[in-house]
Amino acid sequence: MTNPGLEKAQKVFRYVMAVIVFLWIILENFVVFSRYIAKMSFPWSDEVFTMTFIWLIFIGCALAAVDNKHIEISVLTDALHGRSKMILKVVQNLFMLIFIAVLLVQSISICRMQAMINQTTAILRIQVWYTTAAMVVGSAAWLVVTIWKIAVYIKAAMEGKEVR
């Protein structure tokens, strides 16, 4: 299951995640050094870690969907082969699609509300919707991947083939 557009998006998301983790490492070393060596504390670092962690989670969800890394009970799918397995995969992904669509709609709603009321973080005074936007971006990407996978599984079922 390869798609050039999906592969480019994967590279971008992996790059973003790598940058975030790299910055985490630098910031964490700075915080540890300043706390234990320089005896200074920076409470804003917790907010930065929380915000970036949320971005990692939702970008990671979309990436996990591309590689079929989400947790699943595979007893039935392992027992089936060919067309019946692909039909089951379509049904599974349709349920996933409903979940992701609800997540996307609700995250957009929350994000809009946070922007309208001008909600900010306690220490850095950063708009909270920047963090909630991770849910929007991640679930939108996850939705696109799931729709693409459903199309691939339907095509495979119609041809009587099996894809991963």
Image (cartoon, rainbow, N blue to C red):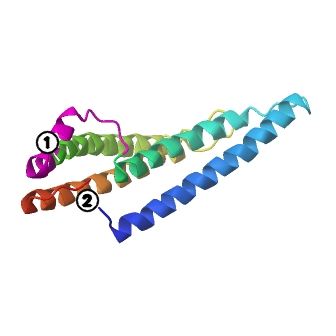
Indicate the secondary structure of the residue bearing disc 1.
loop
Label of residue 145 in the image: none
**Residue 113 image point, x, y percent:** 42, 41
To which residue does mark 1 refer?
A: 80
Q: Could you say which is closer to the camera, residue 129 or residue 29?
A: 29
Secondary structure mostly seen in the magenta stretch: helix
Is-magenta flag for residue 48?
no
Q: Does 6 appear above or below 84?
A: below
In the picture as drawn, the residue positioned furthest to the bottom comes out as 4
The amino acid marked with disc number 2 is: Trp
The residue lying at 30 percent from left, 57 percent from top is 144
Instruction: Give the residue drawn at x 25%, y 55%.
Output: 149
Residue at image coords 19%, 40%: 77
Tally of numbered tags: 2
Establish if 43 lies above or below 132: above
Residue 94's x, y, as percent?
18, 45
User: In the rendered structure, which disc, 2 or 1, sits on the residue that comes first in sequence?
Assistant: 1
In screen coordinates, is 75 left or right of 2? left
* Disc sitting over residue 148 in the figure: 2
Occupied quadrant, residue 69: top left
Residue 135: image x %, image y %?
Answer: 43, 44
> Which segment did they paint magenta?
69-88
Residue 92 locus on image (x, y percent) = 19, 42
> Is residue 30 found left or right of 88 in the rendered image?
right
Magenta run includes residue 75 = yes
Q: Is residue 12 left or right of residue 143?
A: right
CA neighbours of label 2 inside 10 A, class few (<14), some (14 to 19), many (20+): some
Q: Are marks 2 and 1 in contact (CB under 8 Å)?
A: no
Residue nearest the viewer, comparing 93 with 87: 87
